[in-house]
Amino acid sequence: MEIIEDEIEALKTVITDLEKTKITVFDPVNGEVQTDTYLVVPMKSLKALPGIDVIQHYNNIRSYVPDISELRSIYDYIPSSDFSTWMPPFDAFGTVEGNTFTTFDGKTYQFNGRCSYVLAGDYMDGNFSIVLDYMGKQKRRVIITTTKHAEQLLPKNKLRVDGVIVEMPYHAKDLSVVNEGDDVTVSGHGFTVRHNVPSDVYEIGLSGWYYGKTGGLLGTYDNERQNDMMMPSRQLANDVTSFADTWEVNDRCR
């Protein structure tokens, strides 16, 4: 607040600029004081509002407007207007960045894949599955399957839906795909997939209503990191490779 107050005072000084206001007659004994008062804009009469060229004066005082960019960080602490996010279960996010995997519960591990693996899937109702497919030559894609469609986020910012290359934005009944800047975002019922194309980083988001209902390389999403290496058999794997192999979609790489 102190920074803002200082900037406001500086702005006041520019607008009023009392140094340009001069006393031409000072005779308090006879009750006469006259001044030449500096005005920001010309005025022909005190009975009428001045005509102001807003753009011209904006450019003149722009450098004196207080910089309140620091206040933007406050938005991080303002609750969402979506009431469903105020109470648990909360949304969860997992990421794939190069060979680094971070589960929904925050466990991080290294894995260099070479096949197709389930990142996350609804294993209670089968509403969706998200598969990471290594295509070779350091290329990979994400395959998203819902009850109605199969979408592929391909390299070079391409989208394939049910086997056909389509343009973005794409909207269907159960999901949408939009391209905003460097990000491609798929939004479905209770999940999101965000791909930052230049860095090839994937962020998978799950609604809190999938708490304890998912499995895959991004873990079980139950706030327990200890069981994030759970295999489809509900047993815990002893190492990352054994864990990942159980979530392989097919055995073409074996």
Image (cartoon, rainbow, N blue to C red):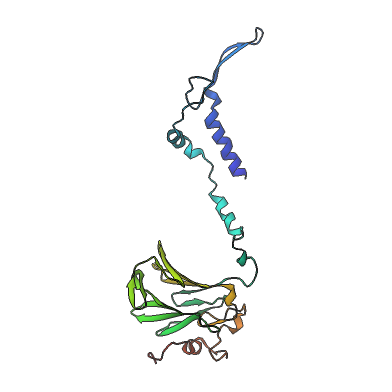
Q: Is residue 118 visible?
A: yes
Please say if 81 is above or below 67: below
Task: From the viewer's perspective, tell me whether residue 128 is left or right of residue 167.
Answer: right
- Residue pushed farthest top? 30
Q: Residue 190, percent across and down?
A: 53, 73
Residue found 57% across the figure and 51% down from its top:
71
Q: Residue 169, percent across and down?
A: 39, 65
What quarter of the picture does the N terminus occupy?
top right
Q: Residue 64, percent across and down?
A: 51, 38
Q: Of 91 and 74, which appears nearest the observer?
A: 91
- Residue pushed farthest right? 29
Q: Residue 184, percent across and down?
A: 41, 67
Please say if 173 is above or below 231: above
Please say if 225 is above or below 178: below
Q: Of 217 and 187, which appears nearest the observer?
A: 187
- Residue pushed farthest front? 173
Residue 196 sits in quarter = bottom left
Residue found 35% across the figure and 81% down from its top:
135
What quarter of the picture does the C terminus occupy?
bottom left
Count numbered badges in the picture: 0
Q: Is residue 110 visible?
A: no
Task: From the viewer's perspective, tell me whether residue 230 is left or right of residue 249.
Answer: right
Residue 104 sits in quarter = bottom right
Q: Of 189 and 22, which appears nearest the observer?
A: 189
